[in-house]
Amino acid sequence: MLMASQRPRQAAVEYAAAIADEPAVMPIVDEVLARMPDAAAAARALPDERYATARATAALLLRARYDVLYLYMQRITAAHPERDQPFAQLAVAAMALGKPGEALAAAQTADRLRPTTLTALAVALALAALDRQAEAIEVLRRAPPSAVANQRANVAVNLAALLRARGDLAAAREVLDTAAAGLGDHPLVEAQVRRQLGTVEDALGHPNQAEWERRRATELEASK
């Protein structure tokens, strides 16, 4: 209604206020995206308040609107340089848009503000995209431990991929084997790691062990 009445700036203000006041923001974000096809206009219609920003960001990620997320997080990080999460999300958006240099700067800021497994992953992925694989490997080796199984698996899989790309298959195998052994309470996540381990065993010339890993992954998947 506000857009139809040629008041887009007022509409942006009211959309931001509505998102800040409403826990279920997806319908409002969808309306913003539909009524404001210009990414910059849509980004301006999203809120600044910390928790509302987190909800709006989650909605944009679900819709894969990295163009809007990128501009939105640029605005939020400029206004609130003390917040780590907007820098982390800016890194995600920048990577999705093919801007690894900007992603690296944002991820490093997020990691400096609050180092976590996810910020280490973001830094490493940006470094790898910039052909700085050796640095990416070191970042992942030093990544803070996580209580979240998926995060531990992501570190292991990405680290193993980087090691394999450098020809260090034995190290890749060790990383994945260690990770799989620590995922006993998370069978689906362990299955993903074991499938990757199977590809490394194949590359090492161990077809029997590779087949065992694949069978074990299938058993784990069937157990859930």
Image (cartoon, helix red, strand yellow):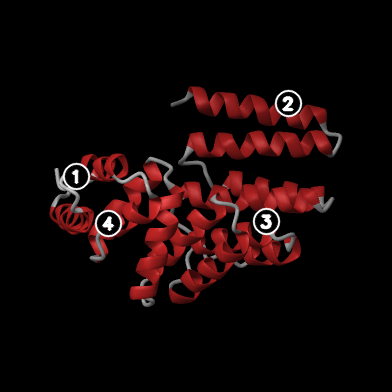
- Residue found at x 62% / y 65%: 101
> Which residue is labeled 2 in the image?
211
Real-space Cα separation, disc 2 to disc 3, in angstroms: 32 Å
The tag earlier along the polypeptide, 4 or 3, is 4
Q: Earlier in the sequence, mark 2 or mark 1?
A: 1
Q: Determine whether the residue tagged by mark 4 lies in a helix, strand or loop.
A: loop
Please tell me whether mark 2 or mark 3 is closer to you in this view: 3
Q: Residue at x 56, y 47 (%)?
A: 153
Which residue position holds label 1?
Answer: 24
The numbered mark at residue 129 is 3
1 vs 4, front mark: 4
Rounded to the nearest angstrom, the CA distance separating label 4 from label 2 is 50 Å
Mark before the other along the chain sequence, 1 or 3: 1
Crowding around mark 2 (Cα neighbors within 10 Å: few <14, some 14 to 19, many 20+) is some
Q: Is residue 45 above or below residue 101?
A: above
- Residue contact at pointers 2 and 3, CB within 8 angstroms: no
**What whole-number distance in Å separates the C-alpha atoms at marks 4 and 3?**
30 Å
Which image quadrant for residue 121? bottom right
Per the image, the residue denoted by label 4 is 46
